[in-house]
Amino acid sequence: MKRKNLNVKKLKNAILKDKKISKIYSKLNLTTKNIKSFLAAISGGSDSMALALLSKLLKNETNKKVYFVHVDHAIRKNSSKEALHLKNILKKYRINLKIIKNKKNIQKNIQKNARDTRYQILCDFCKKNNIKSLVTAHHKDDQIETFLIRLSRGSGVEGLSSMSESTKLNYGIKLLRPFLKFKKDELQTISKKLFKKIIKDPSNKNKKFLRTNIRELTKILRKKGIEPDQIYRSIENISSTKKAINFYVKQSLKKFVKFKKRETILDFDMFQKEPADVKFKIINTIVKNRASSYYPPRAKKVLNLINRFKSKSSQKSTLGGCIFEKRKNFVHVTKEF
């Protein structure tokens, strides 16, 4: 079977005859069941290439409108060539890849700023094309790495619950992660069946990045008898705790937080009586609502804000793109820009 002559039917047979792969496809189908269109974010790694192939099958079987988009961060010297190579690979499978080049000069905190920029570019594309859902190929290994990174930073329940299968981004766009319960190896099986060569990001081996070192740590933990699935079960348990906290937070927001058109008003005396994790979630909810910020502020910054307001009756501070101003017993929150 020649790769470049594969039609959709042959592509389907090549992928879905494997029961494990069929299960992954079914999960993607179920996750996107009630949406008419979505954007598939394609980085060029084996996991996102699997997403590209499965999304192509889904597009042809359901008539959904699927946009395939790659963000060229323009950080590495050969990134543009790699993006074009990726486009040509996918073209053989009748997948039309849109390449968007980042125009920002990213030099500091590269991984975080590149990620934030990527999501903003993808959200802008979604808004422009009236796309309500964005699908990524994050998997179980990513989830475990994220958990360990946040553990190293002293995160609370909110952070340690790691990534959720569905999250709201800017402009109300829904971020969907259908593969979180599947291992990277399972997604690689799909890519290896059809692609001779997968683009590898050299930064994945650069030890100046925390995630690279965390990846090495998981290998050490495995040698010591701590399996990834054990860590994943802890993540699921923490996620259950997060759901309970979220339920409580919803009740608290109704009692002492008023969301108005131009500002949000928080009753600080009532707020002070809440447990620490509930306080963090309330502040993060206010920031997300007022500043339309996807990533919540770090726990340390939230704690510093709360402590400043405890010590003074009147004060103004900024956090997560918002201005917090305490006037007597109430905190007024407005958007910074």
Image (cartoon, rainbow, N blue to C red):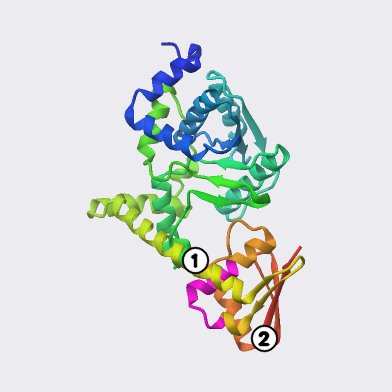
Q: Quadrant of residue 20?
A: top left
Coordinates of residue 169 in the picture (x, y in percent): 61, 51
Query: With 39 as the anchor, is 14 left or right in this view?
Result: left
Rendered-image quadrant of the C terminus? bottom right
Span of residues in magenta:
272-284
State whether residue 55 is above or below residue 110.
Answer: above
Amino acid on which the number 1 mark rests in the picture? Phe
Q: Which residue appears at 56% of the width and 25% of the height? A: 85
Q: Which residue appears at 64% of the width and 32% of the height? A: 99
Residue 329 is labelled as 2
Question: What secondary structure do most residues of the magenta stretch adopt?
Answer: helix
Measured Cα–Cα span from mark 2 to mark 1: 25 Å
Contact flag, marks 2 and 1 (Cβ < 8 Å): no
What kind of element bears circle 2? loop
Q: Read off the residue under disc 1.
A: 247
> Of discs 2 and 1, which sits in the foreground?
1
